[in-house]
Amino acid sequence: MPIRCILHWQPNQGSVVNSQVLNEISQCVESLNGVKEGRCKASLTFYRPNLRDQSVTIDFPRDFLGISMLEQPNKYYLIIRGQKIVLEADSSILLIMEKLQSYKSKVALHFEGVLYKLGDFQIRVIKVVPSQAESLRGIMIEIVENGGKPKICYII
């Protein structure tokens, strides 16, 4: 699923990204006759090894990302960045990882939002919140041509 363009937008100095900005973005999409099609939800977890002995040389990844998506509830994706590997696993891998205790969750983010249909495009307006808090960490907007690949992804 290649992304053609990622634009990182920084708010003006002194202003804060909050739920009011998220509501304004949703209102803009709806004012352009965007129709709500459904909800989208995903979770991203950053894992670190649970080293009992720091002096041991490691032959395993130092860290990796885990991703789950509402559209695919029985799948869990693991991204090992160092080796550029993406692994698709059954969602039961989480139980195995918990029992082995070889990796621990360092940071977890939840992505939750609304899917709009606007002409030939689907637009996802998504809020990003940490798992331990309700404070808004960021906003993601994904624009996809119907049946196509993502064209533009804004991260606020």
Image (spheres, grey):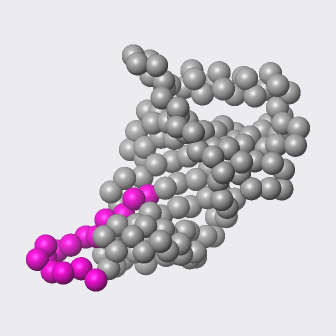
Extreme right residue here? 119
Query: Residue 77's image quarter?
Result: bottom right
Q: Residue at x 57, y 21 (%)?
A: 20
Q: Residue at x 71, y 51 (%)?
A: 150
Extreme left residue here? 55
**Does the magenta-highlighted stretch encompass residue 54?**
yes
Q: Position of residue 32 (x, y in %)?
A: 82, 25
Type of secondary structure dominating the magenta stretch: loop
Extreme front residue here? 4
Could you say which is closer to the camera, residue 154 or residue 75?
Answer: 154
Q: Is residue 47 left or right of residue 141?
A: left
**Does the magenta-highlighted stretch encompass residue 47?**
yes
Q: Position of residue 61 (x, y in %)?
A: 34, 74
Query: Residue 153's image quarter?
Result: top right
Q: Is residue 11 left or right of residue 115?
A: left
Does residue 14 appear in this view? yes
Which residues fall within the magenta stretch? 45-59
Position of 18 relative to 78 (above/below): above
Q: Is residue 14 left or right of residue 127?
A: left
Position of 26 relative to 87 (above/below): above
Query: Residue 147's image quarter?
Result: bottom right
Q: Residue at x 56, y 69 (%)?
A: 76
